[in-house]
Image: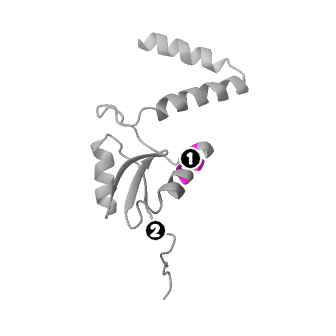
Amino acid sequence: MSMATLEQIIDEARSLSPAEKRKLREVLDLELDQVKVPDRAQRMPSDNGNQETRERRLEWLKSHREEYAGQYVALLGDVLVGHGPTIREAHEQAKHQGIENPFLVRLTSESETLFAGW
């Protein structure tokens, strides 16, 4: 797709109603979600995402908690892009797939007692 064509699409999208813009965003988000491993040359930064993305991520974390208990996971939305015993390992795996800023978190077992005291 040429840049002029992309600019035309963007101009057209600006004229859509708010409901149409939401629908367009949903369709584009679904398209992006289907790309499990982005092209390494196309680096995709990650942020905390919108409410829907955060909800999907939370569901992923809940459903995979025991599977990855004691490990760090790197997520792009609700897609696992790295995991390992250290945050560095999980982040390196994500970077290897072209994800510079994944969501990183350590998962604990539901039965694990957390200590945050003196």
The residue that label 2 is drawn on is: 108
The residue that label 1 is drawn on is: 56
The range drawn in magenta is 53-58
> Would residue 31 be found to the left or right of residue 24 on screen?
left
Callout 2 secondary element: loop
Relative vertical location of residue 108 with respect to residue 114 in this rendering, above or below: above
> Would residue 58 be found to the left or right of residue 96 on screen?
right
Relative vertical location of residue 88 with respect to residue 19 in this rendering, above or below: below
Q: Quadrant of residue 76?
A: top left
Other residues around mark 2 within 10 Å, as few (<14) / some (14–19) / many (≥20): some
Question: Residue 116, position in %: x, y?
Answer: 50, 81
Callout 1 secondary element: helix
Relative vertical location of residue 72 with respect to residue 19 in this rendering, above or below: below
Relative vertical location of residue 40 with respect to residue 47 in this rendering, above or below: above
Q: Three-letter amino acid code at disc 1?
A: Arg
Task: Residue 114: give its label.
Answer: none
59 and 45: which is toward the camera: 59
> Disc 1, disc 2: CB below 8 Å?
no
The kind of secondary structure the magenta stretch mainly shows is: helix
Q: Residue at x 36, y 36 (%)?
A: 37
Question: Residue 49, position in %: x, y?
Answer: 54, 44
Residue 99 within the segment the image draws in magenta: no
Question: Residue 110, position in %: x, y?
Answer: 51, 70
The N terminus lies in which quarter of the figure?
Answer: top left
Q: Three-letter amino acid code at disc 2?
A: Thr
Other residues around mark 1 within 10 Å, as few (<14) / some (14–19) / many (≥20): some
> Would residue 84 be found to the left or right of residue 108 on screen?
left
Question: Residue 67, position in %: x, y?
Answer: 42, 59
Q: Quadrant of residue 11?
A: top right
Label 1 and label 2: CA atoms lie apart by: 19 Å
